[in-house]
Image (cartoon, grey):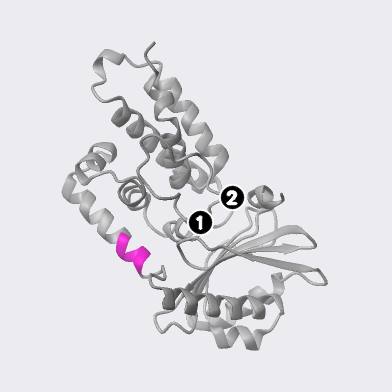
Amino acid sequence: MTHDPFHTHRNLLYSLAHDILGSVGDAEDVVQETWLRWHGVDRDRVDNPRAYLVRVATRLALNARDRLHREYAGPWLPEPVPDPAGDPAEDVARAQAVAYGLMVVLETLSPLERAAFILFEAFGFQHREIARILDRSPAAVRQLVHRAREHVQARRPRFPEERAAAQAVAERFLDAALGGSIAGLMEVLAPDVTLRTDGGGRVRAALRPVTGSDRVSRLLVRVAPIDAELTVRWSTGDGPPTAAVFADGRPYAVLVTVTSEDGHHISEVYGVLNPDKLARLAG
């Protein structure tokens, strides 16, 4: 009995769609739609089923991403999950799923830059393969990957001492934010810091990026939980420091912080407050 190539590569398709979209449910929809298209195609005309399936799933994910961002209230940030969903098995040649902090940073790239980076860095596709998937020239793909890598490397602590310093600054920032200390925030925030919050229209959050240490610190103090028992869980993944904040045992926010070049201040803050996106952390 011949095994259906779709089932062979299903985990790859899911992981790819999830890393592009940052949403479990929407990634599952992409996989389902890929299955429907696979079963409607003339198999005799498909020379490389894996390449065909990846191309379909990638394009469906990019289209879904465009629709989600258009229809969303305010900045869109990825949905946090307790552990990377999907099983990187069979032909997925990568050590781990894209770390959540990196997924958040990738949101500031163009859709094509994000897709090219994920295909190249996380799944090991080569430039010519990515060019066929994205319908771009190999030279254009090299530029997409190069720009994306520069963007990510500027925001990801690479060495142990850099990670330790970034973690220390992130903890100072979170202590000040949760403690409602504007003075403490002003000390740790870079003057040109940018804050992006994802409330999804469900909770109070900025609908556009907020820039400047004074404006950011005042906004953070206004949305800080009051009179609640707080618990913080830090992520140890490969990426910027990431903290899940629980108020009275319930998920309140997930925060990702990017450290400035001097290593002593926070230059970017990303906060997911949408309770729908935090639901998977409840367990």
> Considering the numbered disc 2 on the image, is that residue within a helix, a strand or a loop?
loop
Q: Residue furthest top?
A: 1
> Considering the numbered disc 1 on the image, is that residue within a helix, a strand or a loop?
helix
Check residue 81 in the rendering and tell me which mark sits there, or answer none.
2
Q: Could you say where residue 255 lies in the image, as x and y percent from the top left?
A: 59, 65
Q: Amino acid at mark 1?
A: Tyr
The foreground one among 108 and 152 is 152
Check residue 100 in the rendering and tell me which mark sits there, or answer none.
1
Which of disc 2 and disc 1 is earlier in sequence? 2
Quadrant into which the N terminus falls: top left
The magenta span reads 149-153
Q: Could you say where residue 9 lies in the image, as x and y percent from the top left?
A: 40, 30
Q: Quadrant of residue 146?
A: bottom left
Q: Amino acid at mark 2?
A: Val
Q: Give the residue drawn at x 40%, y 50%.
A: 95
Q: Residues within 10 Å of mark 2 (few under 14, many from 20)?
A: some
Magenta run includes residue 150: yes
Q: Is 248 placed left or right of 49 in the picture?
A: right
Q: Give the residue drawn at x 48%, y 80%.
A: 165
